Amino acid sequence: MNILILGGGGREHALAWAVLQNPKCDKLIVAPGNAGIARIAECADIDILDGGAVAEFAQENAVDFIIIGPEAPLAAGVADRLREAGLLVFGPSQAAARLEASKSFTKEICDAAGAPTAAYARFTDVAPAKDYIRQQGAPIVVKADGLAAGKGVIVAMTEAEALEAIDDMFGGEFGAAGAEVVIEEFMEGEEASFFVLCDGETALPIGTAQDHKRVGEGDEGPNTGGMGAYSPAPVLSDAIAERAMAEIIRPTLAEMAKRGTPYEGVLYAGFMIKDGQARLVEYNCRFGDPECQVLMMRLGGQALDLMQAAAEHRLAEARVNWADDHAMTVVMAAEGYPGSYRKGTQIRGLDALPETAAQMCFHAGTRAAEGKVLANGGRVLNLTARGATLAEARDRAYAMADTLDWPEGFLRRDIGWRILG
Ligand code: AMP
Ligand code: GLY
């Protein structure tokens, strides 16, 4: 089977690594890829937001299966263009990707499906939005409706902060994404992520994870795309997961199917968990990054069979073979991230790292030049490891980080603190 993966971050490196464990994979191309991906697969420089260009490339290269990593091509309708061209695709249609691309759409679906989530109201004008905030009081959560690269959510602990967020959003800080604003009840509890494969009808859970969104140790400092993650997430117990499947995930899929826009691909549900119940914080229409890295490390080569079963509408007959293991990924980022940071600093010591089924360094933002590997993004490396316990996975991940020579990089030392202390 010839496989094409779209994307070029740590998530796509992990997907590529897992796909290559499966003997079914004859040839793997990743577009655009990065320096780490280039070590294991062919990289192609195509515009992954251009569905026509991707379809043409896939046909010219006899690609049998396309896995779409990031949300941008999904929201742009690339999966639709590929399906129209008769290609087999893993990833939702543009209409189904609205579960991530529009927060008010997700709220509407939750209402129709009866799925537990925060109470909310939506606004397109400043004055009524501010009145609502004054009525409700703080804490309260203000969200730009559209995709804002993870920055469109303000969890306001004071009324003043919430009012300021309204000015910023309607003032155009998030461009078109902020033309509509969703204001939500602040939910208390512990967050965890739930990953479910969907084929339009059947939903198959493939794992849980917890992310560390703040840049600093002790969960201090500004939000990032994620500084580390582990799987499984003990707070999302089997009982809570089963209840969430019944109350949130299956009703969502049924509602999407009823509307003629069935959801196919991976549904990433962010939950707030309290008193044995999950409520939905958000949906994403793709794997989390860096959560994908720990999921792929635990699933290995079967990930390809599962994604293929989803794309071919055969999930009802698919099974996940679970190992009783744990995985952790630690993100190394460029000094300054999530603010401004330098690109082009050299990372040494990568060649000496182990590359096994239990330890892998996935590249998130790197570029090769003159035989060197250079940092080429904010989040740069994902030191990912598996173990019989989370402590073992953590020790293996940090052991890799400690052998690297990259003075301009930094990491959090406390990934997994909720469990490991
Ligand atoms: P989102 O982009 O919707 O995932 O929001 C980003 C982060 O904001 C989430 O991971 C939560 O930590 C927080 N958040 C979003 N909505 C709420 C809410 N209604 N109550 C409490 N925290 C929230
Ligand atoms: N790590 C959070 C995300 O992928 O959205």
Image (cartoon, rainbow, N blue to C red):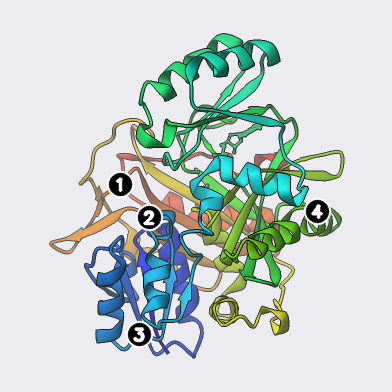
* Image location (x, y in percent) of residue 341: 28, 35
Front: mark 2 or 3: 3
Residue shown at 34% from the left, 68% from the top: 37
N-term-proximal mark, 2 vs 3? 3
**Residue 237, visible in the rendered structure:** no
C-alpha distance separating marks 1 and 3: 29 Å
Q: Are marks 1 and 3 in contact (CB under 8 Å)?
A: no
Q: Label 2 belongs to which residue?
A: 364
**Residue 15, visible in the rendered structure:** yes
Front: mark 4 or 1: 4
Q: Label 3 belongs to which residue?
A: 63
Q: Amino acid at mark 4?
A: Glu
* Image location (x, y in percent) of residue 142: 56, 26
Mark 1 Cα shell of 10 Å, populated few (<14), some (14-19), many (≥20)? some
Residue 34, located in which quarter of the rendered image? bottom left
Dot 3: element: loop
